[in-house]
């Protein structure tokens, strides 16, 4: 059994491919489980949309569910058995809990993924958080206090884990995407998050997209993954594919990284119920 649960659709405005193209890629990669988890809708403080330009609108949920239905139809016609799972990649923002609970009610999702893509800087308007991983703001990173950005990120990640709202927590150290890291042992940032994740029971992902970004490493790094393994945290391996050519990308590299950190199994999830499969 082999799964990729973190993949996107063109509804987020920065992914390309048809349901058939994504499913064909999943089958070609030998996957037996393919999960769709596009960027969930989000509203501004005044309940208006769009929140930003890299996600579907609330009014597009029916279109998203149709996309998943089309993927399921295509998978059913294939000669290779593959299960299609459906979820959403949701953003963690201050006071987002009612919105996440609302998203949860929209469909019997197999899982919800929680992600920190936004941090709110101290001394700035908390209503205008920074999507620090957006390449548009790369220039801003050069003038940013890296220690402060990392502190804000890991506090948000820990709060997200504490909320218990998500089945899977995405790309744990995404804050390193453009290669900006504090000096020294990073365990001081990781340990509170590891404690919160272990207590909440959420699954983390080993996300291979980072291998293709300036940081040139999977998310999370080996040190984080070893701490997660020791804390008994469940793991999935995902590609975060935004194009059919990225489905299950670098799976062998990720398997090696996971085994080196001591993992022997990854997690399968269906209607929020977990089973395990050998790495
Ligand atoms: Zn993400
Ligand atoms: Zn994603």
Image (spheres, helix red, strand yellow):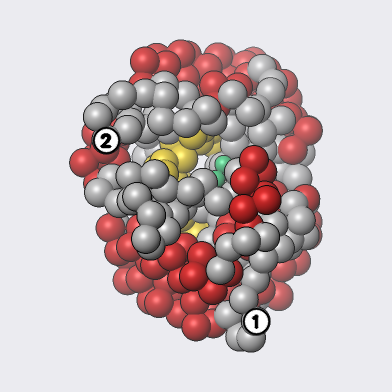
Q: Which mark is residue 183?
A: 1
Q: Quadrant of residue 146?
A: bottom right
- Image point (47%, 24%), residue name: 56
Asked if the beta carbon under badge 1 is closer than 8 A to the nearest atom of ligand 1, the reply is no
Residue 278 shows in this picture: no
- Residue found 37% across the figure and 32% down from its top: 42
Image location of residue 47, percent across then percent down: 26, 27
Under circle 2, the secondary element is loop
Q: Position of residue 145 (x, y in %)?
A: 56, 68
Would residue 99 appear left or right of 41 to someone viewing this image?
Answer: left
Spatial distance from mark 1 to mark 2, Cα to Cα? 36 Å
- 250 up-or-down from 39: above or below: below
The quarter of the displayed image where residue 199 is located: bottom left
Viewer-nearest residue: 16 or 54: 54
- Is the C-beta separation of discs 1 and 2 under 8 Å? no
User: Which callout, 1 or 2, points at the residue further toward the start of the chain?
Assistant: 2
Which mark is drawn over residue 45? 2
Tell me residue 79's x, y (percent).
Answer: 71, 23
Left/right placement of residue 162 relative to residue 137 reads left
């Amino acid at each position: 059994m082999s799964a990729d649960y973190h993949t996107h659709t063109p509804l987020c405005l920065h992914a390309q491919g048809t349901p058939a193209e994504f499913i064909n890629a999943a089958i070609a990669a030998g996957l037996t489980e393919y999960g769709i988890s596009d960027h969930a809708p989000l509203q501004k403080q005044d309940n208006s949309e769009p929140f930003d330009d890299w996600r579907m609108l609330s009014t597009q949920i029916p279109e998203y569910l149709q996309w998943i239905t089309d993927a399921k139809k295509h998978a059913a016609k294939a000669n290779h058995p593959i299960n299609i799972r459906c979820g959403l990649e949701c953003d963690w923002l201050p006071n987002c809990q009612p919105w996440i609970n609302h998203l949860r009610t929209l469909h019997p999702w197999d899982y919800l993924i929680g992600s920190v893509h936004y941090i709110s800087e101290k001394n700035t308007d908390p209503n205008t958080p920074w999507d620090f991983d957006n390449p548009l703001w790369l220039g801003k990173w050069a003038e940013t206090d890296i220690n402060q950005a990392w502190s804000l990120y890991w506090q948000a990640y820990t709060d997200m884990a504490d909320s218990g709202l998500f089945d899977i927590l995405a790309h744990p150290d995404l804050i390193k995407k453009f290669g900006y890291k504090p000096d020294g042992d990073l365990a001081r940032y990781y340990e509170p998050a590891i404690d919160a994740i272990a207590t909440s029971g959420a699954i983390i992902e080993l996300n291979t997209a980072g291998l293709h970004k300036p940081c040139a490493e999977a998310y999370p790094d080996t040190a984080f993954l070893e701490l997660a393994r020791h804390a008994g945290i469940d793991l999935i391996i995902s590609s975060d594919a935004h194009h059919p050519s990225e489905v299950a990308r670098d799976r062998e590299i990720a398997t090696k990284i996971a085994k080196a950190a001591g993992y022997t199994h990854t997690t399968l999830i269906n209607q929020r119920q977990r089973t395990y499969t050998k790495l």
